[in-house]
Amino acid sequence: MITPANQHVTMSALHVAVIGAGAAGLVAARELCHEGLKVVVFEREDQIGGTWVYTPRVEPDPISLDPDRPIIHSSLYSSLRTNLAREAMGFLDYPFVARPGESRDPRRFPGHREVLMFLKDFACEFGIEEMVRLDTEVVNVKLVESGKWKVKSKTRGFSDSESESEDFYDAVVVCNGHFTEPRVAEIPGINSWPGKQMHSHNYRTPEPFQDQIVVLIGSASSAIDICRDIAKVAKEVHVASRSVADETYEKQPGYDNMWFHSMIERSHEDGTLVFLNGRVVLADVILHCTGYKYRFPFLETNGIVTVDDNRVGPLYKHVFPPVLAPSLSFVGLPWKIIPFCLFELQSKWIAAILSGRKMLPSQEEMMGDVKAFYSMMEASGIPKRLSTMIGLLLSAVARAWRNGERKCTMRVTRTDMLDRRHIATSGKIMTWFCKPMKTSASIFRMKLLIDASLNLQVIHHKIRCKSHPLHMP
Ligand SMILES: Cc1cc2nc3c(=O)[nH]c(=O)nc-3n(C[C@H](O)[C@H](O)[C@H](O)COP(=O)(O)OP(=O)(O)OC[C@H]3O[C@@H](n4cnc5c(N)ncnc54)[C@H](O)[C@@H]3O)c2cc1C
């Protein structure tokens, strides 16, 4: 059994199960292999790539509330282009460069298919595909008396036949993604509202919204993309956001059929929706672009790891549950991050710990750190559900900008990576003089700072030294 107490013992021949072959699982497999560990990656779909495997199929329940529904993993819509520049989507030693070929998309913010091709190139380059068991869903993961993890899985065979197997591993790395289980907005009176509801998880193309009056809830990336997509065909699009002032009511510049509102206050049996700004809209559809919930239906930890108001915990630096570390770990939980780069850093850390090359602090120290983090959140009035939202700082800046403020002041733990053109510091207090939000080198550096400031990996000094393309054209 691997425990924090004996983790110094060399564990180079450990068998590690990785759950999921999305970007996180692929890079985790590579890093674990680099450290000489034996890796099996379980993937329930028929190909690698996770989120980036687009499918026109959607779940039968458009709002995905039925717990017994067949699950469609990816939430991609047909028109999706990346919202990060490709320079910010590569791995440290394997950048996401434009590749020649007619089937490739050389744009700086490419379409989703290009990301899938990049991940497949990456898997091929590092021989990861051989470690992946496709069509194999992990249905149960449990620590047994021998100190090993029992991993039960089901493999789909020809003609939809299924076979079950049980294997034992020294460690499990969970990389199952967290953009599949929808979270919907609570709207008073919704049970008797007669219109149609759906979640962006089940949105693919705008055609079904032809001539409809659509109320879309949300203001994050998917909401921004989808409202523009739908406005091409819909009669009216009303975007409701909970992060604006109650009186907000604005016509969206460049559109004659789109308005921006504060949140819906109430829905009525006659099909109308009343917004906090007092406006009333008779709508055909409510489209929830309201994010996702963490879910680990296969994981049995006797309550050691829980999901409470979308906080997965307790986890040391969002990766290791102190009581089960280092044999159980999670890659990819944080959001508002630079995903692939973070997955890689987390994976390097896990691999170094499992191989015995690096040590974790004691269980007590890790738990103390988690508690201090939770206390800091509570004292700052940050809700539990934002525990893994690493880019809180960026959001604060974005909010300040939207509200017309031109500066945003935050307390940070490090100031040495700041872009001095926009930022002033005094002790640990940082003032960012806001610039319009766009993905730029300064924002990328900012994100690294945020990771560092939350003390996420404390590997940030390595990032600065490595040749990751911070210099953007
Ligand atoms: C609409 C949308 C747009 C996005 N745009 C961007 C972007 O522009 N840039 C960016 O960097 N990021 C973007 N992201 C974030 C994106 O999710 C991450 O970049 C990244 O792909 C997540 O990788 P992952 O491996 O953590 O999860 P996933 O890609 O979701 O992979 C998880 C894998 O685990 C498998 N799995 C789950 N449960 C089991 C099980 N029980 N047994 C076996 N296998 C299982 C799934 O089938 C899946 O293949 C976007 C996300 C969404 C939803």
Image: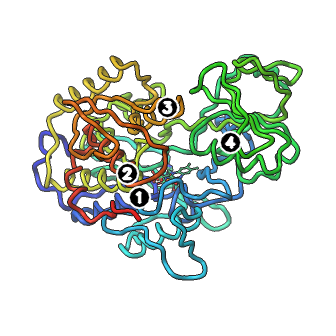
State whether residue 93 appears in this view: yes
- The answer as to whether callout 3 falls within 8 Å of ligand 1 is no
Query: Where is residue 463 drawn, in percent x and y?
Result: 25, 56
Mark 3 neighbour density, 10 Å: few (under 14) some (14–19) many (20 or more): some
Which residue: 41% across, 51% down?
A: 339
Q: Are marks 1 and 2 in contact (CB under 8 Å)?
A: yes
Residue closest to the eye, 412 or 455: 412
- Quarter of the figure with the N terminus: top left
Tag 1 near tag 3, CB within 8 Å: no
Residue denoted by label 1: 88
Mark 4 residue type? Arg
Q: CA distance from mark 2 to mark 3?
A: 18 Å
| In this view, the mark in front (1 or 3) | 3
Q: Quadrant of residue 326?
A: top left
Residue behind mark 4:
69
How far is the residue under mark 2 from the one under mark 4? 38 Å
